[in-house]
Amino acid sequence: MARHDRRKKSSDNEVYDEPEPEAGSEPGPPPACWLCLRPLGEKVDRYHPVPKSRGGRATVAVHPICRRTIETVFTNAELARSAGVRETLADHPEIVRFLAWVAEKAPDFDAPTAPRRKR
Ligand SMILES: [Zn+2]
């Protein structure tokens, strides 16, 4: 007997009351990357838009390649100044280029990003 899916979703009848999923039981990976807004792949990185050392507590889900790009382009001080506002980061010319480039890649696409020494 085939398994019967009794959790059919009727699109205009989303009435189930569940508490906001917060920390604790993870309901599953969030659908999109914080930085590039593409769907997330298998590998999801948790990223602190505001560095922990600067008091940042919230994390966002990003592609590993997106995280590395952010870390390559911005210093911790710059990240702290951006205050976790995505638009501020997405406005950076290098991020603009990255977003345009990565837009057509598969969600699980990963590539070594050129390490840039910055100090
Ligand atoms: Zn991404």
Image (cartoon, rainbow, N blue to C red):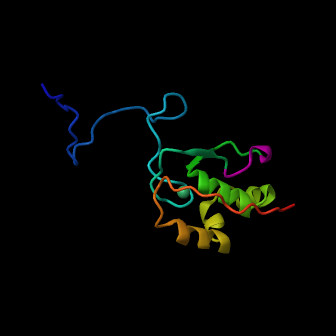
Which x, y percent locates residue 62?
56, 51
Left/right placement of residue 77 relative to residue 15 reads: right
User: In terms of image quarters, where does ligand 1 lie?
Assistant: bottom right
Q: Is residue 2 above or below residue 46?
A: above
Q: Which residues are magenta?
A: 49-54
In the figure, is residue 85 to the left or right of 103? right
Residue 82 versus residue 35: which sits nearer the camera? 35
Q: Is residue 80 visible?
A: yes
Most extreme residue toward the left is: 1
- Image vertical order of residue 40 relative to residue 101, above or below: above
Q: Position of residue 44 (x, y in %)?
A: 54, 45
The quarter of the picture where residue 8 lies is top left
Residue 53 lies in the magenta stretch: yes
Evaluate whether residue 92 shows in this view. Answer: no
Q: Residue at x 56, y 55 (%)?
A: 110
- How far across and down, in percent of the image, does residue 17 sit? 34, 33
Residue at 15%, 29% in the rendered image: 2
Q: Quadrant of the C terminus?
A: bottom right
Q: Residue furthest right?
A: 119
Residue at image position (53%, 45%) is 43
